[in-house]
Amino acid sequence: MGKRKGKCVKKNAATKQALEPEHLVKAPHSFVIHRGKCSKDLMDLTKDFRKIMEPFTASQLKERKKNTIKDFLSISGYMHVSHMIVFTETELGSYMRLARLPRGPTLTFRMHNYSLSRDVVSSLRKQYVMSRAFKHAPLIVLNSFSGEGHHMKLMATMFQNMFPTINITTVKLKNIRRCVLMNYNPATKLIDMRHYVIRAIPVGLNKGTKKMVQGKIPNLNRCKDMSEFFDKAALMSESEFEDDPNSQVVLPQSLASRGAAVNSKSAIRLVELGPRITLQLIKVEDGLMDGEVLFHEHIEKTDEEKALIKKKREEKRRLKEKRKAQQEANVKRKQHEKEELKQKALEGIKKKKELTENQRLMELAAAESQNTADMEQDDVEDDADYYRQEVGAEPEQDLFSQNAPRKRKADEPPRGFKKMRLDKKLQKKYQKSDGTSQKSHNKGGSRKFDRNTDREDNFKNNKDGKKRLHKREDTNRQRPGKQKKVFGGKINKFGKMGQKGKSKGKNKK
């Protein structure tokens, strides 16, 4: 689908004028190229032939060695190109191929001899080159192309269709400035190609009057008066070919040249521009430079050979169509796979976008909890480092740990602040009778005290534990802004553990 044009482009007058009129689009356009290894003269002949085909040809076309016929064929439709002329050269001679685009036929001519435009113009006594003559297509003139055979009719039709057709009722004579002459010799089967420019010279005037009419400046140094220039007998001689009635016509329209007015009698002169080419038809092919041979000048094959060649060509064409169909199927399959892959990718993207708000919140909460745990771990590490710097010893394993409190087992006796007070009472009770209890113990006295030996051990352990707790409190007091709560103790507003009062202790007793 082409790109749509905007409003500015549609309203632009320059864009509308850039479009070619219909009669120019329908006019036959051509490519003139050379292929293979060619001499410099053949390259110059290619440029001269482009001058003949102007203005409906690519006069500045740059062909390269890597370019193929398919490359020119691919752009021929866009450029409205209908004919292609290809010049080639081999050891046997030079050849010219004339092909109709895009499907043929193709005519192959052998060039027996040719002359370049510069050689033709330099050989003339009076050179006449007019650049305005190349603004319009030339007139094609065919002579003796009425011979028998399909190749003759095909050759004449190809030459005629190379140039635009002329409508006699609407043609303007001032636009016909050149002509191309094709003369066929049935005896030698050669075609002589010539290129001329057309001039109209007024007739019935003497030389002096003719010069004045044509705008030329006369030489009056030998004349005493202007009338002498027009009346002098020596200046009134005219050449015989100007008086030839076969070359004289009455102009139905006025021409651009001076003295060629409407209904005036003028003589038609042809001035050769070149190049000159002598051609001979060698071969006619059905396709574009590769097809069934319809005519060959030197080789003639039997019907059986023709049938065999035709069979091979049909098989080749069938294989080509099969490969083309297979390629198209592969292209469609790849496009289908590409579409499926695209749909899968879109579905995956859609599923990603369909995540619920709860899932996003859960992910966010998990990330926040992970960040909090990392921060707490950093604080614990900072406390341990501070303890090492101040105390100079490694902290205990559970001192700065932030683990959850371990649950007490069912059969484990409760311990805490109340147990510590009970141990103190037992200490005071047995401290009074220390000596007697020791003696009785040695003598094997009361077994009640022996049974409570484990209580004494617990008392010592609790005493050591209490010292450790006081040591931790002192350490925490030294760190400003940090206070640790010890299990089984209380922290008052002064930062000291609560102590038992006398009244409180008496009341409890």
Image (cartoon, helix red, strand yellow):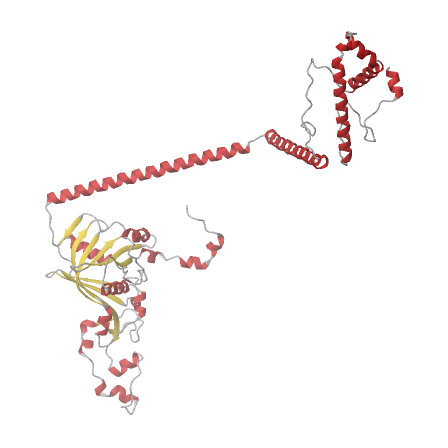
Q: Please state if 156 lies on the left or on the right of 333 as rendered.
A: left
On screen, residue 385 above or below 435: below
Please identify the quarter of the rendering in which residue 497 is found: top right
Rendered view: 220 above or below 213 = below
Give the residue drawn at x 23%, y 78%: 204
Q: Quadrant of residue 323?
A: top left
Q: Residue at x 11, y 43 (%)?
A: 304
**Residue 115's spot in the image, x, y percent?**
20, 67
Q: Nearer the viewer, residue 201 or 157?
A: 157
Residue placed most toward the observer, 341 or 104:
341
Is residue 463 placed above or below 361 in the rendered structure? above
Please report the residue visible at 83 percent of the width from the left and 11 percent of the height from the top: 436
Q: Quadrant of the N terminus?
A: top left
Residue 57 percent location from the top left of the image: 30, 60
Camera sees residue 492: yes
Q: Nearer the viewer, residue 402 or 172?
A: 402
Query: Among all residues in the image, which is located at the extreme bottom?
Result: 224
**Horizontal arrangement in the rendering, residue 492 relative to residue 153 (left or right):** right
